[in-house]
Amino acid sequence: MTTAAITPHVTDYKTAGAYTGQKGIWSWLTTVDHKRIGKLYLFTALFFFMVGGLEAVVIRAQLGGPNRSLVSAEFYNQLFTMHGTTMVFLAIMPLSAAFFNFLIPLQIGARDVAFPRLNAFSYWVYLFGGIFITVPIFFALAPNGGWFGYTPLTTKAYSPGINIDFWVIGLLILGVSSLAAAFNFLTTIINLRAPGMTLMRMPMFTWMSFVVQFLLVLAFPVITIALVFLLFDRFFGTNFYTVTAGGDPLLWQHLFWIFGHPEVYILVLPAFGLVSELLPTYSQKPLFGYAVVVYSGILIGFLGFGVWAHHMFAVGMGPVADTVFSLTTMLIAIPTGVKIFNWIATVAQGKLKFTTAMLFALGLISLFTIGGISGIMHSSPPANLQQTDTYFIVAHFHYVLFGGSIMGIFGGIYHYFPKMFGRLMHEGLGKIHFWLTFIAMNLTFFPMHYAGLLGMPRRIYTYDANQGWDLFNAISTGGAYLLGVAIIVFIWNFLSSMKRGAIAGPNPWNAPTLEWSIPSPPPEYNFAQTPEVHSRYPMWDQRASDVDHPKVNLTEGKSPEQMGIIMPYNTIKPLVVALGLVVMFSGLIASRDPATGGSKPVLWVMFAGAAVMIGALYSWLLSPLEPEHHAH
Amino acid sequence: MHYTATGLDNRKIAIWAFIGSECMLFMSLISTYLIYKGKSVVGPFPHEAWTDPMTGRVFHGILDIPVTSASTFVLLMSSLFMVLALAAVQNKHVPKHTTGDRILGSSRLWLFMTALAGTTFLGFQAFEFTSFVHEGLTIRRNLFGSTFFTLTGFHGAHVTAGVLWLLTLLAIDFKRGLTAADEMVVDMCALYWHFVDVVWIAIFTLIYLIR
Amino acid sequence: MADPHTPAPVIDPSHALPPAGESTAGHAHHPDEKPHPTWKQYKWVALILAVITIAEVWIYYIPAFVASRLFVPSLLIMSAIKFAIVVMFYMHLRYDHKLFRVLFTGPLIIAITSVIALMFLFGQVALRLQ
Amino acid sequence: MKGSSRLRRLLPYLAFTALALTLVACTGETTQYPNSTFEPKTELGRAIDDLWDILLLLGTIVFVLVELALAFVVWKYRNNKEAKHTHGNTKLEILWTMIPAVILVFIAVPTVRTIFETQAPAPGDALKVDVIGHQWWWEFRYPEYGVTTANELYLPVGRTVSFSLTTKDVIHSFWIPQMGAKRDLIANRTNYIWFTPDTAIAPSVWNGFCTEYCGTSHAFMRFRVFTVTPEQFESWVAGQKATAAFNAGPAAPAPSAPDSQPPAASPLDTNPPAQPIGPPTGTGTAQLAGGVAPGYFFPHESMPEYAVPQRPLPANISFTRGLTGDPARGQTAFMLGGCIGCHTVRGNPMAAGTIGPDLTHFATRHTLAGGTYPNTTDYLARWIKNARVMKPGSIMPTLGKGEYDPVLKRTAPVSLDDQQIADIVAYLQQLR
Ligand code: HEA
Ligand code: HEA
Ligand code: CUA
Ligand SMILES: [Cu+2]
């Protein structure tokens, strides 16, 4: 083979890079280190993934047979609303954010993100917002309007309770987190690339993340406004969605889906990016058609803004609008297909290594394709009218979300676990996890295609016997239980490998990109010296001239001070600002209105929160990020 | 400053990205206003008079173009003050020979003028809002009220944040003097301020002038 | 170990690197940047903006013109010009790094397209055959 | 990587292909898959189905090709010793950009044609039906005939029917899988959909659903569609047009049936004529148009299993066994018990409420409360006693004495004892 792994100069990996310098809870609360924040994101998001998964399991248990009454209708509605909301906003997006955080600076050769404190702030807002929106389910007060909260059902007239308030405010809070993070990563990717890391040399994960940041920046303001309207309607009696005042229920739908469709690419593109890292590594050859994969990613993101109304074919937009949105939607198959084919071509002629990560990557290709094809079937409006709001749609989006995003993220976890924790995950358990997941996933979601086309509407808490759906639902439910087992295997593997996994070394997979040039886990400062990049695959493309110009950065486990590297101060301020923000918002629902059963704003809570937020914000902005530079 | 790949300041990239994001925010607000234009069930309306069939009360067209033109003009001029403030900070090190130079080069003066213009604009808006309420248009009254107050209110909130930012800069300027090192912060503030102005240009035409 | 297949490193001139670690960002005139406008220009810009604003308000008070089909387009054009002038001169977009132009015009285009699309979807232009 | 796991990789696909084939093979049977979208019964459904066939075919081809290509490269290079460093191949990449594009053209052209075909204006002589969504039941009006019903729709076969869809509250969606296509019911808007039921399907019954999540009992917002011959339809219309036909019989002693007696059979169990629960009293309050024979309605014994709700009675509503209801007393209770505030019984000028379903010909209906329960005595009595336990969140309040109202979270304010309810049941079962 023409490429060779770089022989590490470090012998003891236990200490190499294991320098933490910082220990204890307080160091986690105050950290501004992108790697630690990435881990916080990872743990929190995995936790919420379990919560969302558990909700799904209860859903499936209820639907396992006709006319079951494991949960009430009211609670079921909360379950699927929270399942969708949790999975989308609290599990997959933050799982992606975990990778953005951990990987992007490492992949582009940076010391940290552009705004480390803002990064910490994003995480804390996410955590508090996540708790805010999740807690009510334990009191059966959770949001119950579905994950896209269609008006007028979610207006006060039809949802007088406190439930929807949690949703509206929770999503507003989470939006702050996503937007702050997006500006941060956008800047990071544009500006902190190491010398020589041109755009077209960026690792594909960074590229896809780059596209995702644009989607976030452009999509989130729209849902923010839609939510603000709903908030105003619910709390201040405005008329945006009030039917009697002439309000149009479709306004919400358009605004939501202008956000919502880009959102689904926000969910899947990071996974695509991860897969585009994994396949070359485990095939030991460069990504096939790098440039085209980049352009197709950009195109998917761009087209993603012009297709939103394909979620609304049943609302009667008229044939012209139906046609336009149908055609733009179909177009997306082309760039997506290009990706799929380039991945397959990457595998072709490779020296394949079937690690768990590789299996998940291959799994993504095979499963996402199914979801993509059913997506194309939805995109044809007349056909869509037989499919929309049935389990056929549920099948589609689980194939793309589970078969796409989750498979990619699992692959990414197996692949990057050694970089994060310095240890390998157990391959045997990993394979069990993969096969269980792969089989159970199909068992769960494939029968939904049939259930849907045989007439089963979605979001029904129970269904009648003799409808021809029993068998498919029973299989789905069995599959979901099996998925639960698979996830337990994963969690077990994850936790035990953190403690007992084999020591990984800096580049256990002979991967080509920059992050593998430094110890695992990386030292606080990432790169002792800013690396210089000469190609897309620096770890593979060692040249003769590189001997005196090393791009590999292996350093002993020294502290930054010993290395003469200036690190940002730890600070609690971002956390305080986040807390203030969340308190301010929760003031809106701090008290229960006995008249309606809904909630009432409590002004002093809001002001207290705002005061804390603004005070801490000023103090943050006026304090320096890091010690003054003395020498270079 | 650390090394950056483009040679640009991180913060400037971030503020531009933020402004891009704000485009979508105001897009949503303006779209909603336009979508609901003419769809209110009851008056008052922006331009036409309306008689309440129940009470016989007559509501006149609400929008007051002369007053708003004045406030628009003030906001427009604030943009001029803002560029002058920025230029003043950027040219701190250039020696001033004449009084004219010194005035033109006074960052405190121009920051103050910008903040003052912004506050004046807010004053106009407060006046506008209260007089509308007196004329029977509240945020709950009809679709026009809801969309109008929310859109212009969001814009006003942006102006308020901008004024706070300007006042903070002004305070720093008085305390220790803004230096070349602060140029980026003033630049960011200026970009934000101009963007808020630009949004008003759109609002003034789309909401006030077009009938 | 050299890889024959590795493409020659393409160094985009716009990514040419200033000396690392230099505190140049604020002042450095990037190859892309043209000199910024001066007080004189600012003054003229302000004047033009004021004139257009006056024109806008003025035509608003000409009933015949308001009734004509030119009214709305001319208002839109005038405000677009104002918009562009502020962005180009006051926000220095004309002189600054092209990156900023991309960061601003990209979203602006998507936003404007979305407004127009929504107008179609909610207006009479959304054809219904029944 | 050993071969066995690769095989395992393929297994699910094989299994699913097999499943798919079996399914396609047995789609002929309506009873097995009563809500199948694969056996359209209208021209609209067929237009969609034809489109679907194209989608399915092309989709399957793409699916098979992609999965085969993936499986092939994985198989072929499983033991490859040396990676061949290709960076790309422009020709190949152009090729696989073009192929999907071409496939999409084959999807897009029939799609657009079908869009315009299915959304063309309905023929002018179409039967007009207004569909009005309510949380969580359906109101159907036939403006040509002045007929209003709920949850059960009669359509003459062979005649185009054009629905105009609106809602009284939140968004609902109207869907009869076998007839094809669904449309949302949206406030401040009217939507349309039209189709022509095949003549071969008279008389039969189809299930319909609300498919847009509309709140608590979205699952229980179903309806039935009866496709009948034009003659049957005319007869049904005539029956429905008539005001409530309630025969007040001769006087009878107050009901006190022995406890051993099981609750009276449903009137629908024997059909027609009406089956009074007990001998009606002759207090003579009935100022009803008597003696009009009810028009045609779909015979109860012909109801296929899939159209009869199977939902069991909630265990927590008890009802005194063996009561005999009296329709005339029932009518009085109906008037005094608050029912008329929400329900219309044409022929009874007092009963003109519009919040709930029109009950004028309630006894001709086969189901209760949005197709949730069969319209039999047991269910009906419990429905009136505690509608909100029977159907979560129902707008119809809990009315039984001592019953807990789960929405108001307190005991029912208006209360009817079991005897009164039995009377009302008897009355309602006369409304045919
Ligand atoms: C990860 C998230 C994700 C992704 C990537 C996608 C991708 C796509 N989606 Fe999906 N979608 C969702 C998540 C996602 N979707 C969700 C969550 C919903 C439901 C929301 C809700 O209602 O709750 C939804 C709903 C949804 C609908 C609305 C259905 C309805 O409610 O009526 C439609 C309609 O057009 C649609 C279409 C598509 C299309 C065309 C793609 C395309 O991008 C797919 C493109 C990919 C391929 C086609 C496969 C690979 C290509 C080839 C191998 C080339 C050759 C192929 C062909 C020529 C066909 N999706
Ligand atoms: C984003 C990703 C995502 C993911 C990963 C999933 C995962 C799953 N979903 Fe999800 N789903 C959505 C997004 C997602 N879903 C969305 C957006 C909706 C629409 C909501 C709406 O309509 O509003 C939806 C709706 C939806 C429905 C339809 C509900 C309805 O319409 O009535 C169903 C029904 O079967 C379902 C099932 C499942 C199942 C079985 C899984 C499984 O894959 C879950 C697997 C995970 C687990 C099984 C984890 C379990 C973990 C354990 C068991 C560990 C033990 C726990 C402890 C020790 C504490 N989902
Ligand atoms: Cu009505 Cu769902
Ligand atoms: Cu979509």
Image: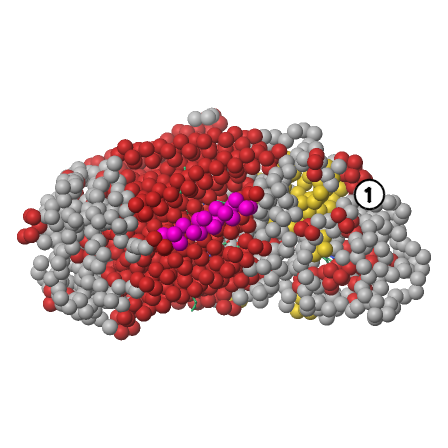
Residue D394: image quadrant is bottom right
Viewer-side residue, A562 vs D64: D64
C61 w.r.t. B193: above or below: above
Q: Residue at x 49, y 27 (%)?
A: C67
Tell me the magenta residue range: D6-23
User: Left or right of D78: which side holds A155?
Assistant: right
User: Left or right of C53: which side holds A502?
Assistant: left
Magenta segment, prevailing SS (helix, strand or loop): helix
Q: Residues within 10 Å of mark 1 (few under 14, many from 20)?
A: some
Residue B95 can be seen, yes or no: yes
Residue A525: image quadrant is bottom left
SS for callout 1 = loop
Q: Residue at x 36, y 52 (%)?
A: D6
Viewer-side residue, A289 vs A319: A289
Query: In the rendering, at what x and y percent does residue A544 appear?
Result: 7, 48
Q: Which amino acid type corresponds to the residue marked 1 in the rendered image? A: Gly
User: Left or right of B140: which side holds B21?
Assistant: left
Viewer-side residue, A429 vs B205: A429
Q: Quadrant of the N terminus of chain D?
A: bottom left
Residue B31 can be seen, yes or no: no
Query: In the rendering, at what x and y percent does residue A486 appear?
Result: 41, 62
In the rendered image, which residue does mark 1 sit on? D295
Query: In the rendering, at what x and y percent does residue D308 appear?
Result: 70, 53
Q: Residue at x 12, y 50 (%)?
A: A542
